[in-house]
Amino acid sequence: MTSAAAPERLPGKQAPVVLSVRGVKKTIRGKPIIKGVSFDVREGEIFGFLGPNGSGKTTTIRMLVDLIRPTEGTITICGCDVQRQPDVALRYVGCIVENPELYSYLTGWENLEHFARMLPGVGQDRIREVAAIVGMDQRIHDKVRTYSLGMRQRLGIAQALLGRPKLLILDEPTNGLDPQGIKEMREFIQQLAEGGLSLFVSSHLLSEIQQMCDRVAIISHGEVIAVGDTDELVRQLGGLAVWRADPVRQAAAILRDGGIEVLDVSDAATGQADGDAHYVGSVTVRMEPQDAPELTRRLVEAGVAVYGIEMKHATLEDLFLSLTAGERIE
Ligand SMILES: Nc1ncnc2c1ncn2[C@@H]1O[C@H](COP(=O)(O)OP(=O)(O)OP(=O)(O)O)[C@@H](O)[C@H]1O
């Protein structure tokens, strides 16, 4: 768990598997969109599903909730096969894909009543309960059109919680929220997991996923390229350094020639100003501090001006850059 906000919540590696995805592929009109995706989500875990736009997150989520069928592979929720027994498997799932469908001319309460009618055994008590869980009890009798986007998202989650799911699937839950709304949503998701719910959260926001999720699967071009404990994955990258050098592209080439993995090159235009207001670019690389003297010597001998070198902790963004050889996520 990266976030310092909820250190006490450590879902065990032995917690029961709630969602299991095995070798799932999807071909649409002859085009392979999902090329083999496997991962497990355990009880009480916040699982991040991270990938750039167009990488296949929504297509995968649609298969998780039987909106479309995999071409190959299996998906089970609480041990039930989603494709063979959708009615049983999907009883365990609450899901918000894209924007929650809400009637803005009704109150929050009336919206929940409307959706509760479709769920056997869900009555007024449960509506009161979910309104309280999402912190909407004060405003639940106001019309939805008076709600902020964050409140609408919460009401959508309340709706998804009505049927007492074991797994909540949220597709880009922080989309469109301001920084305060994002923080509230993150804390709220962490509270839900503390209550034992499993959360599957898709996002293209690296820092969000790093702060919020216990484990993560990274998807790129329809393939899961990494899956595991968020902190462990990042730690495995080892030491990172940012060189500030000019000309920056020549510096990157020399470092590469020296067998150093270059994660990112930022040109002078986006580089930081030094004390003399002279702008230089930066190169982010994987290296250990003991490599610095020899690499500095090589750069200087080749005529590159070295303005500084700073060791830094790896982030999920660095991991993503390393796995995708520099592909940008945002
Ligand atoms: N019905 C379809 N027919 C053809 N191509 C499709 C179809 N659905 C999705 N795709 C393609 O599959 C790829 C993955 O799309 P998907 O929507 O799953 O990605 P995503 O990661 O959710 O991205 P975004 O965040 O932009 O929605 C994209 O290249 C998309 O154009």
Image: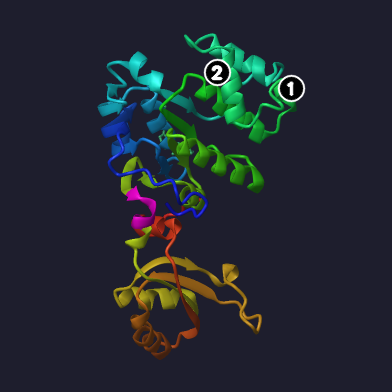
Over which residues does the magenta segment extend?
228-233
Q: Amino acid at mark 1?
A: Asp
User: Where in the figure is residue 315, as x and y percent of width and height?
Assistant: 44, 60
Q: Amino acid at mark 2?
A: Arg
Who's the residue at 34% across and 56% down the image? 232
Against 261, residue 34 (above or below) is above
Q: Earlier in the sequence, mark 2 or mark 1?
A: 2
User: Where in the figure is residue 293, as x and y percent of width and height?
Assistant: 37, 87
Residues at marks 2 and 1, CA–CA distance in whole angstroms: 19 Å
Secondary structure beneath dot 2 equals: helix
Against 172, residue 250 (above or below) is below
Against 37, residue 121 (above or below) is above
Left or right for 243, reference 24? right
Q: Which residue is mark 2?
A: 126
Secondary structure beneath dot 1 equals: loop
Q: Is residue 230 on the magenta stretch?
A: yes
Figure quadrant, ligand 1: top left
Main secondary-structure element of the magenta-colored stretch: helix
Label 2 Cα neighbours within 10 Å, binned few <14 / some 14-19 / many ≥20 = some
* Viewer-side residue, 53 vs 116: 116
Q: Is residue 38 on the magenta stretch?
A: no
User: Where in the figure is residue 286, as x and y percent of width and height?
Assistant: 36, 70
Q: Which residue is mark 1?
A: 142
Left or right for 276, reference 71? right
Left or right for 108, reference 62? right
The colour scheme of the drawn protein is rainbow
